[in-house]
Image (cartoon, helix red, strand yellow):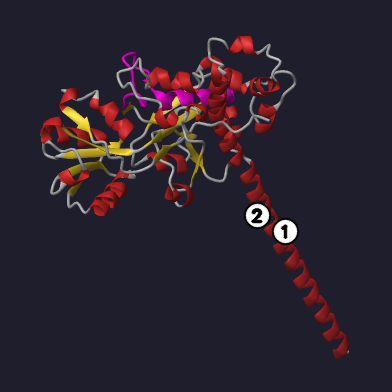
Amino acid sequence: MKKNLSLLFSMLLVLGLALAGCSGNSEESNSSSGKESSKSTSMLETIIKRGTLKAGVNDALPGFGYIGSDGKNTGFDVDFARAIAAGVLGDANKVEFRPLSATDRFTAVQSKEVDVLIRNTTWTTNRDAEVGLSFAPVTFYDGQGIMVPKDSDITTLEDLEGKTIGVETGTTTELNLADQMKAAGVSYTPQTFDNADAVIAAYESGSIDAWTTDKSGLVSRQSMLQDPDAHVILDATLSKEPLAPAVLDNDEKWKDAVSWIVYATIQAEEFGITSANVDEFLESDNPEIQRLLGVGGNNLGEQLGIPNDFAYQVIKQVGNYGEIYDRNLGPDTVFKLERGQNALYSDGGLQYSIPFR
């Protein structure tokens, strides 16, 4: 009898363990399924359902992102936000612009306050790995510079010995400045400020001897000084500053859409397709152009989860890369920035589109 009871107890124990194991597996399976479901929901799908793009931009950097005389956001980065809206939603105007400071821009991406950050942001290892951003192709190749008063007789880094240099906190410029001044053997006093306006106010008041940021930013801000001609930008370039749109990490579907929209503007310029002549190219028998514009049965857009004519909409509504550059920074603007590294690769620059095929 005892033997039978012992056998029965053992059987019940095994059965209980088996059921517990099944329950645990079920919970684990449900948890895993939930994770997979979460991962499968891309920001791209959210944006399409919402019907608007939320873009984090600068609103105080002329040429790149600022508020125009008409009260609207305008600039190089702003146009790329509009290009993304045109490519994803078919309408370049379906953008909500969120002005962000250098210190709060990353939190805005992490918290999903914005869908994409296009705010003169440098692509770096730390921001890619630690901050949790994923970068699209570089839209502007830049480098850090230093501005000084023309009458200061400062022409080299060595001439800054013992000087006070202003820098905006929360940017890559602090580390770059320290690295380059150390390499040059120059002792200086760094003074940090919460924003660019504060740096410039201190510089114009004479409380700092020089200030530093990306050279494009120096050119932009110089145009706003009381006497632009009284200041010069030193020839020295302190760093490489590849500026690129950024999205939240681990969302390849959304990153791919942003990336190929940027490439579309570059490829269009390579082909000579502009906002003015893009309709003529719809009849082209060139298969590469057909693939780019989504005609002739080509479905590259569908593969990306966006309309097949996404590139056409981007070019028609916003323009190719050269049009965007010239409209905001080129020879007919106050900045008159040479294309330089931002020229097409065929013109000796770095801008190069991955093939549309």
| Foreground residue among 334 and 39 | 334
Q: Quadrant of residue 101?
A: top left
* Other-residue count near label 2 (Cα within 10 Å), few / some / many at <14 / 14–19 / ≥20: few
Residue identifier under label 2: 31
**Can you say which quadrant of the picture contains the C terminus?**
top right
Where in the figure is residue 212, as x and y percent of width and height?
A: 25, 39
Q: Quadrant of residue 339?
A: top left
Mark found first going from the N terminus, 1 or 2? 1
Residue carrying label 1: 26
Residue type at tag 2: Ser
Q: Residues within 10 Å of mark 1 (few under 14, many from 20)?
A: few
**Does the magenta-highlighted stretch encompass residue 308?**
no
Against 271, residue 140 (above or below) is below
Q: Residue 32 vs residue 323: left or right? A: right
Residue farthest along the bottom direction in this orientation: 2
Q: Which residues are magenta?
A: 61-89
Q: Compared with residue 309, is residue 17 higher up or lower down, i.e. above or below?
A: below
At mark 1, the secondary structure is: helix
Query: Residue 247: x, y in percent?
Result: 50, 39
* Horizontal and vertical percent position of residue 113: 45, 36
Secondary structure at badge 2 equals helix
